[in-house]
Amino acid sequence: MKNLRQAKIGDTVKVVRLHGEGAVKRRIMDMGITRGVEIYVRKVAPLGDPVEINVRGYELSLRKADAEMIEIE
């Protein structure tokens, strides 16, 4: 299982599954990150937090903990 946290800068990945429960999972889905969507990894901060991505045509920054909940292929 590979998660978004492990993706490298410049990778385009596809979301397979979202982990987490309740409000956290709902917040990630409300940002447009759902199963099957493609994500482009733009930048990763020097210490790995946050991760800047492009999803559905807009830029988004995710915390490291949130990125670990997104399973990719």
Image (cartoon, helix red, strand yellow):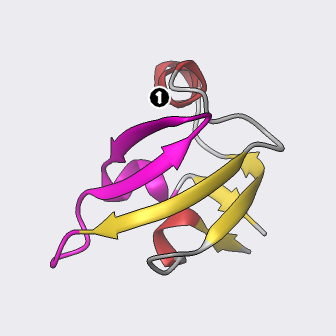
Q: Which residues are magenta?
A: 45-68
The correct choice, above or below, for 14 with respect to 48 in the image is above
Number of numbered callouts drawn:
1
Q: Quadrant of residue 65?
A: bottom left
Q: Is residue 20 left or right of residue 13?
A: left
Q: Is residue 56 left or right of residue 36?
A: left
The correct choice, above or below, for 20 with respect to 5 in the image is above
Q: Position of residue 19 (x, y in %)?
A: 65, 46
The residue singled out by tag 1 in the image is 24
Q: Name the residue: 16% across, 78% down.
A: 46
Q: Is residue 61 left or right of residue 12?
A: left
Q: Quadrant of residue 2?
A: bottom right
**Which quadrant would the N terminus be assigned to in this image?**
bottom right
Q: Residues within 10 Å of mark 1 (few under 14, many from 20)?
A: few
Residue 58 falls within the magenta-colored stretch: yes
Q: Position of residue 64 (x, y in %)?
A: 33, 59
Q: Name the residue: 56% across, 35% down.
A: 57
Residue 31 falls within the magenta-colored stretch: no
Q: Position of residue 63 (x, y in %)?
A: 30, 50
Amino acid type at circle 1 is: Val
Q: Position of residue 17 (x, y in %)?
A: 77, 48
**Along the viewing direction, whichever of 54 and 70 lies nearer the viewer:** 54
Q: Quadrant of residue 12?
A: bottom right
The correct choice, above or below, for 49 with respect to 63 in the image is below
Q: Name the residue: 35% across, 47% down.
A: 62
Q: Residue furthest left?
A: 46
**Which quadrant would the C terminus be assigned to in this image?**
bottom right
